[in-house]
Amino acid sequence: MSPEPMVNGKRVGPHKNILKWKTKIAWLAGIIDGEGSIIVTEGKRNGRHLCRILFVNTDVGILSAAKQILSDLEIFYIGQLKPSSGNRKDCWTVEVNRQIEVRRLGRLLLLYLQSGAKREKLSLALRLIDETQKTAEGKRSNLRRQLGKKRLVVEVN
């Protein structure tokens, strides 16, 4: 039997590590519930669906904690500064837009999102990402186009 891992000189059992990650992912889901967006769009030319998870905030502490969680999960994100204008503060946008990354993060967040509309939209995004598969030639193909279905209209209240 292998010994338990050590962190900062303390033994860390598997239960503590799992609980720590569940707490971090639940916290990130709360940030996305309150300050975030789940965006599903359909390309005009190719009919492919693009899904993004993003949030905007001005608090540097919240942003660094969220970016650290994404980095620890090895999820690629884009962080952009939107400079202040008028009487508004500088704000940062953190965006996950690679479809494989949206799928990984979305599956983790789905368990913890409290907003019914965001949970429904994220479920839709995950289904659409799963429908888009690579063909034998390595090109991406949208199954909706193969099946001859028309453009998807999404309404979330």
Image (tube, grey):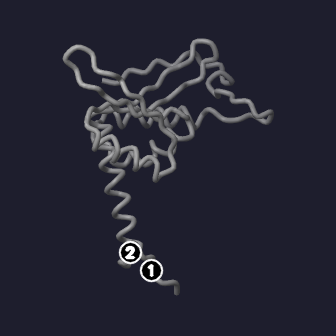
**5 displayed left or right of 37:** right
- Identify which residue is drawn at 24% across, 25% down: 89
- Identify which residue is drawn at 29% across, 39% down: 60
Identify whether 153 is placed above or below 52: above
- Identify which residue is drawn at 46% across, 53% down: 72
Camera-side residue: 142 or 95? 95
**81 displayed left or right of 150:** left
Camera-side residue: 68 or 46? 68
Residue 77 position, x and y percent, is: 48, 38
Q: Circle 2 — which element?
A: loop
Q: Mark 1 packing: few (<14 Cα in 10 Å), some, or many (20+)?
A: few
Residue 135, by quadrant, is top right
User: Which residue lies under the disc numbered 1?
Assistant: 4
Residue 37 position, x and y percent, is: 36, 30
User: Which residue lies under the disc numbered 2?
Assistant: 12
Residue 123 position, x and y percent, is: 44, 37
Q: Amino acid at mark 2?
A: Val
Q: Amino acid at mark 1?
A: Glu
Taking the view exactly as shown, the residue that stands out farthest to the left is 87
Q: Mark 2 packing: few (<14 Cα in 10 Å), some, or many (20+)?
A: some
Residue 90 position, x and y percent, is: 28, 26
Quadrant housing the C terminus: top left
Callouts 1 and 2 close, C-beta under 8 Å? yes
Camera-side residue: 8 or 130? 8
Looking at the image, is mark 1 or mark 2 earlier in the sequence?
Answer: 1
Residue 53, by quadrant, is top left
Marks 1 and 2 sit apart, C-alpha to C-alpha, by 6 Å
Identify whether 120 is placed above or below 84: below
Camera-side residue: 146 or 8? 8
- Identify which residue is drawn at 25% across, 37% down: 59
